[in-house]
Image: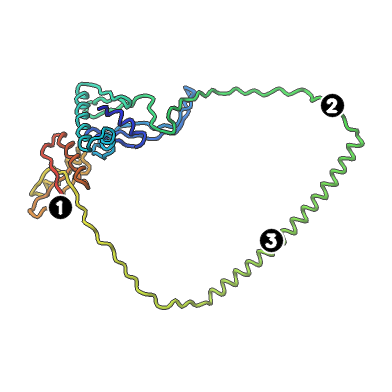
Amino acid sequence: MDLSAHIHYLLYKHDCVTVPGFGSFLVEQKAAYYDVDAQLYFPPSKVVSFNEQLQSNDGTLASHLATSFGQSYERSVMDMHQETIAWKEKLQKGKLNIPTLGSFVLNSEGKLVFTPENGLNFLVASYALPEVLAQPISRTIAEQPAKPPVYFELEQTKSKRAFGYAAVAASVLALFAVGSNSFLNQQADAQWQTEQMLRQQAREQAAVSVYDLGELPALNIELPKEEQVVGFHVIAGSFRSEANAQRLATALQRKGYYGAKKLAQTPQGFYQVSFASFPTKREAYNAMSGIKRDNYPDAWVLKK
């Protein structure tokens, strides 16, 4: 099974694709930008990253594999598990290269370090868009002729007469505009005064009015009863001492199991500590498989 090709395909449709027991590939949108040194415009994109902490099975990859290969969901989960085992074996020997995604190495603390493959863009709207070369444009001021050519000249007497006609026409238009503006302003003032008088009359009438609504009926509201949510818990241990149970829950949280907690006391007087809680049995058992691989072989599932 070429698991990398299916992860690559799903990243075009989903912002997160989880490989149970290994980690999650995430994509984040990046706006278009201009590289000054290279003088290139780069299109918008979605870049890929990796989070080792997100290992719980969200069902996205397993459902896609079941549909693609025409097999059951459980079989797809087993195939993914075998692939992740092979990946971890390669990491122990050195570098893990995953085609169309990137490469992994282990640092000095045993944590995964992911380097994405160059040129990846998971934004469908920018698919196959290349970088655009952008060079500065050198602008110069066009030279102006020393003197525009003269094609004809108006007689002096005619130009003065035309200027006089134009001045008279401008004066008439100015007087007309002033008179029109004065008339419009008077109309607007009269309308505004009328509206103010009507508003004042309405306020005075509302102030002296008395509204009799009668006796209002009593309003009874029944709150819905809270339904008890049945959960499935991956149990790490059971203790008589509440303090010991709380210490284990705190230790698991420090190791990265942020959902670890101490459950309520059982009728037999025990305090159970869970790695995490899930709404369905399938999610709980998938999580238990990954937890057992993390050196917790005694983990088990409790319905409560």
Tell me the SS state at disc 1.
Answer: loop
Give the distance between the C-alpha atoms of the residues marked 2 and 1, in whole angstroms: 103 Å
**What label does residue 17 carry, if any?**
none
Q: Which residue is mark 1?
A: 264
Q: Total of numbered circles in the picture?
A: 3
Q: Looking at numbered disc 1 in the image, what kind of residue is underneath it?
A: Ala
Identify the residue at the far right of this view: 157
Q: Secondary structure at mark 2?
A: loop
Is residue 110 shown left or right of residue 268? right
Instruction: Pick whichever of labels 3 and 1 is earlier in the sequence.
Output: 3
Residue at image point 53% right, 77% down: 208
- Bin the neighbour count of mark 1 within 10 Å (Cα to Cα): few under 14, some 14-19, many 20 and up: few
Viewer-proximal residue, 250 or 192? Answer: 192
Q: Label 3 amino acid?
A: Ala
Q: What amino acid type should be assigned to the residue bearing mark 2?
A: Tyr
| Label 2 sits on residue | 151
Secondary structure under tag 3 reads helix
Q: Residue 292 placed where, x, y %?
A: 14, 36
Q: Position of residue 206 (x, y in %)?
A: 54, 73
Give residue 183's quadrant in the image. Answer: bottom right
Distance from disc 3 to disc 1, alpha carbons, whole Å, reads: 76 Å
Instruction: Measure how far apart labels 3 and 2 are at the Cα level.
Output: 53 Å
At horizontal 56% and vertical 71% (from top left) the residue drawn is 203
Q: Please name the residue shown 21% across and 46% down the image.
A: 280
Residue 77, horizontal then vertical, whole percent = 21, 35
Q: Which residue is mark 3?
A: 188
